[in-house]
Image: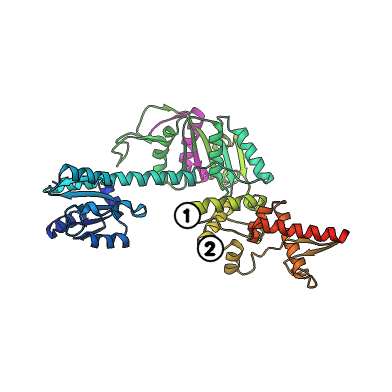
Amino acid sequence: MPPSLDPNKASQYQAFSVLVVDDEVGMQTILDKALNKWFSKVDCVGSIEEAESLRIANHYDLIVLDINLPGRSGIDWEEAFNDPDKKADVIFMTGYADLETAICALKLGASDFILKPFNLGQMLQAVQRCMDKRLELRHQYALQHDFKRHITTDIVGGSEKTKQLKQLITQFAPSRASVLIEGESGTGKELVARGVHEASMRSGPFVPINCGAIAPELLESELFGHNAGAFTGAKKSREGLFRVASGGTLFLDEIGEMPLAMQSALLRVLEQRTIRPVGCEKEVSVDVRVVAATNRNLQQEVSHGNFRQDLFYRLNVLKIEVAPLRERKADLIELVPFFTKMLSSELGMPDPQWAYEDILAVNEYDWPGNIRELKNLIERCILLGKPPAHYWRDNHGDTFKPSVTMTVSNGAELIELTSNGHQQQGYPNDWDLKEVEKAHIQQLVDYHRGNKSAAARDLGVARKTLERKFKEWENEESSYVD
């Protein structure tokens, strides 16, 4: 009897595709009918030539391959094993196998070897082993990718407000006291909470929960856990997040969304450091540090009666205010290249070479969505292949146009240039091309604080070209002095 498949796993198998290669039409029919119950795509062919055409045109996760075929045998199908870009698991099957053939098949990299005649259950068990292994590899990759994408405690930026933020994290981390993080949406409050946890050196995990994303009637069970039969549908006991976070940090995001009834229960936990799971008479001691965050002004919420005053005082032992991006625009010079490099790597695309105007342009916007909006814009620009200034100009006209004042030098003469229409735009009309080139190169080198390699990247030329230009200008100046 064919093995039964876990419904959850069956839905995951739908993402896999299978190629059956057998010259017996009856065998094709049996395997096609059985595998179509598990997989969304099953193709069947009778020769290696047909199979190779399909393999080149499509992706297959599994190939069920007969060894004895007309023309080329399954053992001779080297392309199926040697193509690193289209690597599939291979299950060999044959009715005329000897030991030498089996060894040869396994040396090629076959995942399994089945002798005909076989019962269908035997084949499906072999298929399930291959796919479970492939699923596990996908899950491991996804977890690694998620870790790299989300679990980072780097707080990027060198502005005064960001320096103060990093100092507070270092200062507050060793304490067990609760921390309240306030700031607008998208400013990176969870990143700050992770930073506090990492710097605290607590042995337990960092466990985040969004209080506004869980139904009020389920929040108590989610935080404190429940016993089997505590309420309708509670078939099994469940540990709450307070126990999961034992020895570590529980991050209560959007604490301002927590219902008043739950606020009372949370206050009791913070004061007594014990929890009572739903349906349980005994209290359980917990060693958990609570870090809460909100984009609301909790002091105002208290005055409006939406938040308990006693809980506010209990949470507000240590307070960190995360400034919006518009108040720390000096961080943009580090945030833009940081997100650009990170997102390019995640998207599998080369790092874009953005110009000086793009850094200027992002400084002229107030970023109401804060760092989340900045990251979203950079990701969109990378995918579309448009620098930020060009993207904004195409979608919003000139509202993103930089209005920064720049000073360029022409010998002893200083000329102020702006792009807002109040003064002359561009370089003076009486300058020749050589003077414009020199002023523009010098402007970029000054912007990068003397880093000629960075200036050369913005200009799209080699550093040697810049060195040659500067040497020419030095020679010209020395000849004037002589």
- Which numbered disc flags the more N-terminal residue, 2 or 1? 1
Which picture quadrant has residue 455? bottom right
- Residue 196 spot, x, y in % from top left: 56, 36
Instruction: In the rendered view, tell whether residue 220 sits above or below residue 481.
Output: above
Query: Which three-letter amino acid code belongs to the residue tagged 2?
Result: Gly
Q: Give the residue drawn at x 50%, y 51%.
A: 345
- Bounds of the magenta span? 251-278
> Is 270 one of the magenta-colored residues?
yes
Residue with the mark numbered 1: 348
- Residue 452 spot, x, y in % from top left: 69, 53
Residue 342 horizontal side relative to residue 330, left or right: left
Query: Which three-letter amino acid code belongs to the residue tagged 1?
Result: Gly
Residue with the mark numbered 2: 385
User: As rendered, which of 86 and 147 lies closer to the eye?
Assistant: 86
- Residue 475 spot, x, y in % from top left: 80, 59
Q: Give the residue drawn at x 58%, y 62%.
A: 387
Are there few (<14), some (14-19), or many (20+) residues within 10 Å of tag 1? few
Residue 123 horizontal side relative to residue 469, left or right: left
> Is 175 one of the magenta-colored residues?
no
Q: Is residue 472 visible?
A: yes
Are there few (<14), some (14-19), or many (20+) residues within 10 Å of tag 2? few
